Amino acid sequence: MAGYCASQQRFQSLQRIMNSINGAAEKCAGLFLIGMVLAISISVFVRLLYTYTGIPFSTPWAEELGRFMMVGSVFIGGAVATYRLRLIGVDAFIGMVPESVARWLRVAAHILTLMLAVLLAWKSIRLIELGMRQTSPAMEMPMAYIYVFMFIGCVLMSLNTFFHVVKELLNAEIWQQGAEAERSAAAIQNSEGGAL
């Protein structure tokens, strides 16, 4: 039982760390989303200004910045959605099987997601290397800065998915220990009832 309490305490400290990391990531994704809206709004305003006044003014950087902000928002926000279990999934089959089987199906799904996230993080390293030699057309900044969003998002998604695997395994352990505790309590109760 002492080992069980120690693993629960370690898990709770891990959960606090993951909560703070994902809270910061959520704020970052929100800032990227606000930045995207502002950049696209500037682009639309300048286009309207040109259309109605004829002033030759353009902001190609605004559209490009909006796209880059969207990329950051998608990858960082996707990692946070993984932590909050808000990604699209088909759980009709899981709802039809007993909870003990459903738990292991969720573990298998998390492991497959983890493998995909690790693969994407690994491939994004190659994109970052290629991006060091490329620049964006309008802002002329290295594309590696944009590909870093993919790497950060996929690494965070991997961490979040690993967290859910550990959580499911601890719940399975809790469920098994709870069943054993109920059986032992029932056995004690039966032995006391038989003794009286």
Image (spheres, rainbow, N blue to C red):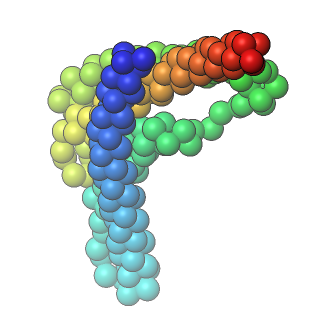
Tell me where residue 161 appears, x and y as whole percent. 45, 27
Tell me where residue 3 appears, x and y as whole percent. 36, 16
The outermost residue toward the right is 96
Residue 70 higher or lower than 178, as above or below: below
Q: Nearer the viewer, residue 72 or 188?
A: 188
Instruction: Answer with the quarter of the image where residue 14 lies.
Output: top left
Q: Residue at x 41, y 31 (%)?
A: 160
Residue 8 higher or lower than 43, as above or below: above
Residue 73 higher or lower than 100, as above or below: below
Tell me where residue 63 appears, x and y as whole percent. 36, 58
Q: Residue at x 30, y 76 (%)?
A: 56
Q: In the rendered view of the protein, which quadrant contains the N terminus?
A: top left
Tell me where residue 157 appears, x and y as whole percent. 40, 31
Q: In the rendered view of the protein, which quadrant contains the C terminus?
A: top right
Instruction: Answer with the quarter of the image where residue 151 lies.
Output: top left
Instruction: Answer with the quarter of the image where residue 32 lies.
Output: bottom left
Q: Residue at x 40, y 65 (%)?
A: 37
Q: Is residue 100 visible from the viewing direction of this image?
A: no
Q: Nearer the viewer, residue 1 or 79?
A: 1
Q: Is residue 18 left or right of residue 192?
A: left
